[in-house]
Image (cartoon, rainbow, N blue to C red):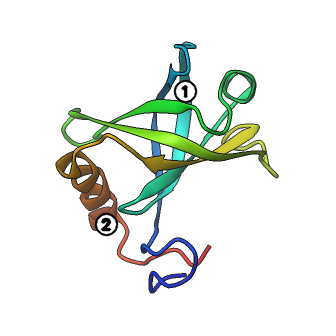
Amino acid sequence: MADGSGRRGATRYTMALEGCAERISPTPAGIFRVAATNISLTGLMVHGHSDLGVFVSGGDVVRLSFSSPDTGVAVVVKGVVKWKRRSALNILGQWSLGVKFQDTSDSEIRKLHDRVQKAWSAPSDN
């Protein structure tokens, strides 16, 4: 919901941001390329290919890194995977993950969120 009502409680913004995901808990499991497609102040959705679906599950803790296309500066956030499902389309990857931010400073979340909010002024209704 664009107004932040409903089950999520925070406005989500659509985006297309490439980065990396690394499973850090329960045990490290490598680094995977991902694409983020929406973000709020509480979490984001990322997509990846088969290795992401094999090595990352609900409840795992992941570190996500996204570099700014304009400055090259990386923003790193950490979160817990709340859900995992097969993607309907393989354009961005075979798997989608819903990640809720955890143990990440408000300033890092705000940097990522503000970058997206500037680029896209219209909230997503998905």
Residue 48: x %, y % from top left: 64, 34
The residue that appears at 41% across and 63% down in the rendered structure is: 40
83 with respect to 14 (left or right): right
Q: Is residue 36 above or below residue 118?
A: above
* Image quadrant in which the C terminus is located: bottom right
Apparent side of residue 91 relative to residue 68 in the rendered image (left or right): right
Secondary structure beneath label 2:
helix
Q: Which residue is mark 2?
A: 117
- Quadrant of residue 104 in the image? top left
Q: Nearer the viewer, residue 17 or 78?
A: 78
Q: Within 10 angstroms of label 1, few (less than 14), some, or many (20 or more) residues?
A: some
Cα–Cα gap, marks 2 and 1 = 23 Å
Quarter of the image for residue 120 reads bottom left
Give the residue pinned by disc 1.
33
Report the number of numbered marks. 2
Type of amino acid under label 1: Arg
Q: Tell me: 45 left or right of 109.
A: right
User: Taking 78 as reference, is 10 above or below it?
Assistant: below
Name the amino acid, label 2: Gln
Position of residue 23 measured from the top left corner of the image (x, y, whole percent): 52, 23
Q: Nearer the viewer, residue 35 or 79?
A: 79
Quadrant location, the N terminus:
bottom right
Q: Which mark is residue 82?
A: none
Disc 2 residue crowd, few under 14, some 14–19, many 20+, Cα 10 Å:
some
Q: Position of residue 58 (x, y in %)?
A: 66, 39
Q: Is residue 13 above or below residue 105?
A: below
